Amino acid sequence: MSSTSTVDIRRADERFKTDIGWLDSKHSFSFGHHFRPDNTHFGLLLVNNDDIVTPGAGFETHPHRDMEIVTWVLRGALVHQDSEGHNGIIYPGLAQRMSAGTGILHSEKNDSWRLSGGPGHADPVHFVQMWVVPDEAGRTPGYEQLEIDAELLAGGLVPVASGMGKHADAAAIRIGQEHAALYAARLAPGGSVTLPEAPFVHLFVPLGSVTLESDGPLGAGDAARLTASGGQRVTAGPDGAEILVWEMHAVARLG
């Protein structure tokens, strides 16, 4: 791993885009038919998809294997069903993880019209889905979710998902990757947090705007990939912000 300190800013409009009517998706890394060999992952993070799904639509049943998948809803509600018999409704402030392991089938739908009283009450669902490679292939598939809305109200970095030893006990949900942890923060205007120290830190701003201590403003959809550059302050702009931060102590070995 490199010990050279770098901050790589990726702007929202630089992301790969998939817009197929019911789905408006922005991809931070190569995904599906969008491929660029120099942008396949950062640290252990392979997918950071910023998705908006229209009411009544969604991802039909499809397979995954050997991947730790964390879904974070920003607005609306997403209905999850999988082949292991898990069913759940994911909404803002609820941490959710699916371990694909030896193989799992699942679907994700925006059923807001069913959940809120009919078609006239339907809303899009906006969520970020993130994939990290597991530290061990062939795990037993699993699912976990936990509400952490009260913790987010405090304004600091809240551990959402972790597999990092004692840090995992403080996180809302556990992932099968001992070298990674995900944090979220809802920041009031002018609120600030300090990024964790790690070889790889991925900062994503799905809502609002922030100022990164070393590199200035980041708007909605912007990201910063920090290599050996943790410990910086992130301060919310005039409308506040919601941020997602991955702390990673290893790099994915692909291919």
Image (tube, rainbow, N blue to C red):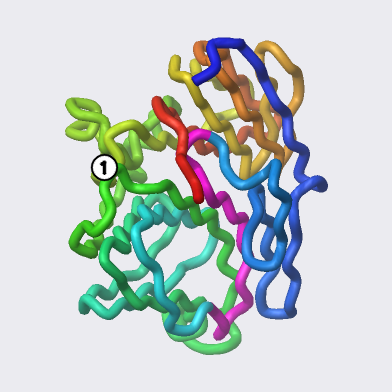
Q: What stretch is highlighted in magenta?
A: 43-58
Residue shown at the point (57%, 43%) measured from the top left: 41
Q: Is residue 185 visible from the viewing direction of this image?
A: no
- Mark 1 falls on what kind of element? loop
How far from the left and from the top, in percent, is residue 163?
26, 37
- Neighbour class for label 1 at 10 Å: few (<14), some, many (≥20)? many
How far from the left and from the top, in percent, is residue 234?
59, 20
**Residue 48 inside the magenta-drawn segment:** yes
Total marks in image: 1
Quarter of the image for residue 115 reads bottom left
Which residue in the structure is indicated by mark 1?
A: 172
Q: Is residue 88 visible from the viewing direction of this image?
A: yes
View extreme (front): residue: 255
Question: Could you tell me what secondary structure mostly forms the magenta stretch?
Answer: strand
Q: Nearer the viewer, residue 244 or 134?
A: 134
How far from the left and from the top, in percent, is residue 71?
43, 56
Horizontal placement of 121 versus 100: left or right? Answer: right
Residue 231 position (above or below residue 28) = above
Horizontal placement of 176 versus 17: left or right? Answer: left
- What amino acid type is highlighted by mark number 1? Ala
Residue shown at the point (56%, 29%) measured from the top left: 188
Residue shown at the point (69%, 57%) measured from the top left: 26
**Residue 170 inside the magenta-drawn segment:** no
Residue shown at the point (65%, 54%) measured from the top left: 30
View extreme (right): residue: 13
Horizontal placement of 237 versus 137: left or right? Answer: right
How far from the left and from the top, in percent, is residue 205?
62, 38
